[in-house]
Structure formats: structure tokens, C-alpha cells
């Protein structure tokens, strides 16, 4: 029987100084392959707004869309922990609607949800979710849903004072009950300082090698999404060329009459 990755598994990795991996997925087959490859957390990232739906920012995706993608991904996963990004304005208005929206993701198959940012209100949301039995992953540093208030895609925590502030926020999230915290676009040494002073695991999204885990958008890793590539992403494949080549060969074969062959008809 396959042993499922849980919040206890993730904490054990931290306690034993073992690294763990996180990749995004938005469909059944990709999630299945990530799970079979040993990825520990499969994240239905709101990055799907751009890489899967063609929006310009993550702001455009909603609860219903995230729920549909969560159902697809959850069906493909046996071992990995499934975490869903809560989209923009899905937890910002009041705690009751936040719990309802997060609960919808759990009903759709997620094992946990991810919430961006820090404020007294968000702390209250996290506490209520944890009390309700919904595990929460935090997200600090650069938070895409706060793109406009941050003034664009800017590195966070570049000074000791700024790193101290992120650490203060992270400790508050830890006390509120998060089981892990994503640090996005934070200088490596700042992320190391924050990681070493927390009990819960940190997950680097462009925050260097000293965090407890690493997360990337799978479309960047596979070389499928070509509109934009973050500095911190590593391209392991070239799916763009593969898809183009296969589609072109099919197109050529259809128009030349080479497809279908005698072996491919009834």
C-alpha cells in the first residue's frame, strides 16, 4: 500500500533535514506522472491562470476554475500531498466565505490549501481554517496576488531589516498553525536566516538552496510555457518543440494522405 504524504511527513522532512519537492500540475495525466516520479507535493497553483488559461496575471482565475482543476489533479495522485492555491478574493472578504471556499477545495480532492500574504485578518482566517481541520500552507516574500501593492515583480527581504520583518511574519503564521511556508523571490541568505529560525518547513520559490524544499511551475520545468521564464526556473525539457514537431508532422501527414494508414482504419 502506498504511504500518503501528509503534514506529518512534511514536518518529519524538516526535523530530519531532508529536502522535499513541489511541482505544479493542472490536469490528471501530469499529476499522475509527477506522483509516479516521487514529487512530494503537487500544487494546483493559481499560475494556471497564465500557463493554462492565458490570462495576464493570477488575479483572473476564480474559485470554480480552481475547483475543477483540483478535481482533475486529485484523481491522478496516490502518494503526493495535493495543495490548492486559493485564488484572488477567495479568502479576503470575510472568514465565513474563506472557510467555505477553502472547504470547496478540500471537497474537490485537495489535502490542503495555500494562502498568500500576512495581516491580522489573514491570521484569523488561517486559525479558523486550522480549527476547522483544513491544513494551510503560507506564502511570504513576493506574493503575486499583491502584485499591484508591491509595485511589480520585486525581490523581497533584501536588507536585514526586511528579512527580520519576513521572519516576524513567518513566526506569526507558524503560531497560527500553517504546516509550511513558501518564500518567493527572497535573497538566498535571507531565506536561509528565516528557515533556520522557524520550526515549520520553508519552500523556496526563487529563494535559494537553503530552504527545506523547492517549488517550480511544471510548465517552466518541462519547457512548455514560453511567454516568460523566471530567472530562478530551470528548464529540464523542451515540450514546446516536441508539441510543435508532433502537431506539424500530423498536419503534414493528414494533408499528404499519409494518415491514416491501412493499419489505422477499420
Image (cartoon, grey):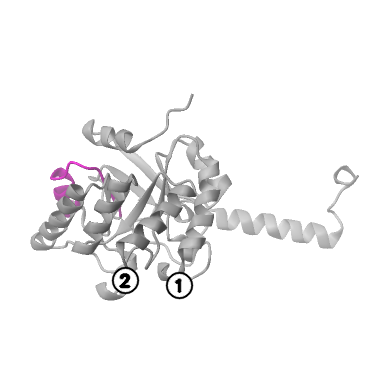
* 10 Å crowding of disc 1: few (<14), some (14-19), many (20+): few
Determine whether 263 is above or below 156 in the image.
above
Residue 7: image location, x then y, percent: 32, 38
Picture quarter containing residue 68? Answer: bottom right
Find the magenta span and give its range.
189-205
Which residue shows up at 62% across the image and 56% down it? 243
Q: Which residue is mark 1?
A: 56
Q: Residue furthest front?
A: 96
Q: Which residue is mark 2?
A: 147
**In the displayed structure image, the side of residue 249 where residue 66 appears, left or right:** left
Mark closest to the chain's N terminus, 2 or 1:
1
From the viewer's side, name the closer residue of 155 and 237. 155
**In the displayed structure image, the side of residue 161 where residue 40 appears, left or right:** right
From the viewer's side, name the closer residue of 252 and 198. 198
How many marks the image carries: the answer is: 2
Q: Residue furthest left?
A: 161
Residue 249: image location, x then y, percent: 73, 56
* 10 Å crowding of disc 2: few (<14), some (14-19), many (20+): some
From the viewer's side, name the closer residue of 18 and 89. 89
Residue 7: which disc?
none
Q: Is residue 205 visible?
A: yes
Task: Determine the secondary structure under disc 1.
Answer: loop
Determine whether 114 is above or below 15 in the image.
below
Which residue shows up at 27% across the image and 44% down it? 179
Amino acid at each position: 500500500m502506498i504511504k500518503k504524504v501528509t503534514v506529518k511527513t512534511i514536518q518529519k522532512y524538516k526535523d530530519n533535514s531532508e529536502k522535499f519537492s513541489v511541482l505544479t500540475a493542472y490536469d490528471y495525466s501530469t499529476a499522475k506522472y509527477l506522483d509516479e516520479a516521487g514529487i512530494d507535493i503537487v500544487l494546483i497553483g493559481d499560475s494556471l491562470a497564465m500557463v493554462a488559461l492565458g490570462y495576464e496575471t493570477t488575479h483572473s482565475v476564480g474559485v470554480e476554475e480552481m475547483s475543477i482543476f483540483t478535481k482533475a489533479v486529485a484523481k491522478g495522485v496516490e502518494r503526493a500531498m495535493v495543495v490548492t492555491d486559493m485564488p484572488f478574493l477567495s479568502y479576503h472578504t470575510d472568514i465565513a466565505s474563506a472557510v467555505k471556499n477553502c472547504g470547496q477545495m478540500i471537497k474537490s480532492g485537495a489535502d490542503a490549501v495555500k494562502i498568500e500574504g500576512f495581516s491580522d485578518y489573514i491570521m484569523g482566517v488561517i486559525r479558523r481554517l486550522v480549527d476547522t481541520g483544513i491544513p494551510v500552507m503560507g506564502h511570504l516574500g513576493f506574493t503575486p496576488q499583491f502584485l499591484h501593492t508591491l509595485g511589480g515583480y520585486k525581490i523581497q527581504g533584501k536588507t536585514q531589516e526586511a528579512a527580520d520583518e519576513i521572519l516576524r511574519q513567518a513566526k506569526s503564521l507558524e503560531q497560527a498553525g500553517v504546516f509550511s511556508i513558501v518564500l518567493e523571490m527572497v535573497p538566498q541568505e535571507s531565506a536561509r536566516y528565516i528557515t533556520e529560525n522557524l520550526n515549520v518547513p520553508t519552500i523556496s520559490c526563487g529563494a535559494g538552496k537553503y530552504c527545506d524544499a523547492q517549488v517550480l511551475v511544471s510548465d517552466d520545468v518541462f519547457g512548455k510555457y514560453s511567454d516568460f521564464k523566471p530567472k530562478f526556473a530551470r528548464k529540464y525539457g523542451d515540450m514546446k518543440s516536441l508539441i510543435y514537431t508532433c502537431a506539424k508532422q500530423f498536419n503534414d501527414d493528414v494533408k499528404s494522405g499519409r494518415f491514416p494508414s491501412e493499419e489505422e482504419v477499420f
